[in-house]
Image: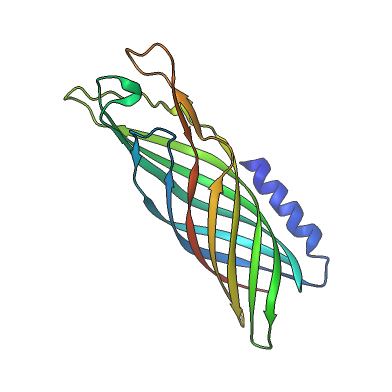
Amino acid sequence: MKKTILLFAMLLSVISLSAQFSFGPKIGYTTSKLSADQSDITSDLKNSFLYGAFVRLGSKVYLQPEINWYTSGSVFKSPSLGGGLSPIEQEINLKNIQIPLYIGFKLADLKLMNIRAQAGPTATIIVDKTIDSKSGGGFIAPIKEADISDLNWGFQFGAGIDVLMLTLDIQYYVGITKMIKEVEVPGITNPVKFDSRSQGFMVTLGWKIM
């Protein structure tokens, strides 16, 4: 985590020497879920607030790195995981540091406002994991913290609007790497493939200091 913050600070110091430069804090709201590549597994949406900061370099075409903190997760439910007889109900809660790098383009650049489109890769570092499992009644808890990858890559795209010093963005993100690949289930010889990826929407409001 310290290395991530240091790299972001170094990037900020380098690009601050450029003429077309702005940065500021941002807050937002996310709704996300963890998918599962099993027809008998369902997962619920999780809502969370987001806090972060952004840097924008460029004018008509721009580069925008960010660093954001938010929580994500899902409740996985299955009546009989992997063909077994035992049901599962596990709530996954994750605290994340997300580092997207957008390449954007201004679709309309007016005097008091502009409209933008942007997209780019994102790295998500999971800094804390908790799993709450339903017990009793034959329920099992196959997903362990060690099954969840600490670093996950994804892709984000969306649109935004700037009005004076305010910047409003709507983004959709989808995981590229698998956050949960497979889990060991009691009574089943082979591990059950989850192939779980994170996906969701976020709406953010930022303030351009420069």
Q: Residue at x 41, y 26 (%)?
A: 144
Q: Quadrant of residue 132?
A: top left
Q: Residue at x 44, y 28 (%)?
A: 145
Q: Position of residue 2 (x, y in %)?
A: 64, 42
Give the position of the C terminus as an image quadrant: bottom right
Q: Residue at x 44, y 48 (%)?
A: 71
Q: Is residue 56 above or below residue 93?
A: below
Q: Is residue 23 left or right of residue 138?
A: right
Q: Position of residue 114 (x, y in %)?
A: 65, 80
Find the residue positioned furthest to the left. Answer: 137
Find the residue positioned furthest to the front. Answer: 39
Q: Is residue 107 left or right of residue 40?
A: right
Q: Quadrant of residue 17?
A: bottom right
Give the position of the N terminus as an image quadrant: top right
Q: Is residue 88 above or below residue 120?
A: above
Q: Residue at x 59, y 54 (%)?
A: 156
Q: Is residue 90 above or below residue 208?
A: above
Closer-to-camera residue (145/197)? 197
